[in-house]
């Protein structure tokens, strides 16, 4: 399955910053409704907070799950490296393939 995502660079302007913060705030609020995590877990979201389609988009089309914190940190670093290596800029489209 693939879907289009659009890069959100929060430092671009006030609109982008507001959407990024809304994504983060929505994720934090909704994660509190999930069963308590293990001590080493963090709540993660898809689509990524750094996309216009994140949890704060208002359409309810997102997923949350507690994952090991080290895995979450590695995934965030890999996403940042992907953005840089592929030169994915603010509002650029990209696809995520689940394999």
Image (tube, rainbow, N blue to C red):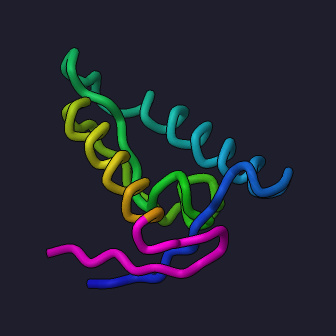
Up-down relation of residue 36 to residue 30 (above or below): above
| Percent of width and height locating residue 7 | 57, 67
Q: In this view, does 50 lie to the left or right of 78?
A: right
* Residue sitting at the far top: 39
Placement of the N terminus among the 4 image quadrants? bottom left
Q: Nearer the viewer, residue 3 or 77?
A: 77
| Percent of width and height locating residue 41 | 24, 27
Query: Would you say residue 62 sits in the magenta stretch?
Result: no
Query: Would you say residue 94 sits in the magenta stretch?
Result: yes
* Residue sitting at the far left: 99
| Percent of width and height locating residue 89 | 60, 70
Q: Which residue is drawn at 21% across and 74% down?
A: 98
Q: Residue at x 62, y 53 (%)?
A: 56
Magenta region, main secondary structure = loop
Q: Which of 15 and 79 is in front in this view?
A: 79
The part of the image, by quadrant, that contains residue 72 is top left
Up-down relation of residue 86 to residue 68 (above or below): below
Up-down relation of residue 79 to residue 34 (above or below): below
| Percent of width and height locating residue 74 | 26, 42
The part of the image, by quadrant, that contains residue 54 is bottom right
Up-down relation of residue 95 to residue 13 (above or below): below
Residue 59 seen by the camera: no
Q: Is residue 80 left or right of residue 51?
A: left
Residue 77 seen by the camera: yes
- Give the mark count: 0
Q: Residue at x 43, y 34 (%)?
A: 31
Q: Give the range drawn in magenta.
A: 85-99
* Residue sitting at the far right: 14
Q: Residue at x 44, y 28 (%)?
A: 32
Placement of the C terminus among the 4 image quadrants? bottom left
Q: Nearer the viewer, residue 71 or 53?
A: 71
């Amino acid at each position: 399955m693939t879907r289009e995502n659009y890069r959100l660079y929060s430092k671009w302007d006030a609109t982008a910053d507001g959407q990024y913060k809304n994504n983060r705030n929505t994720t934090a609020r909704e994660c509190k409704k999930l069963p308590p995590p293990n001590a080493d877990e963090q709540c993660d979201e898809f689509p990524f907070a750094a996309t216009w389609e994140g949890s704060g988009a208002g359409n309810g089309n997102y997923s949350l799950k507690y994952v090991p914190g080290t895995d979450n940190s590695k995934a965030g670093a890999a996403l940042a490296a992907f953005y840089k290596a592929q030169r994915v800029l603010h509002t650029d489209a990209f696809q995520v393939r689940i394999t």
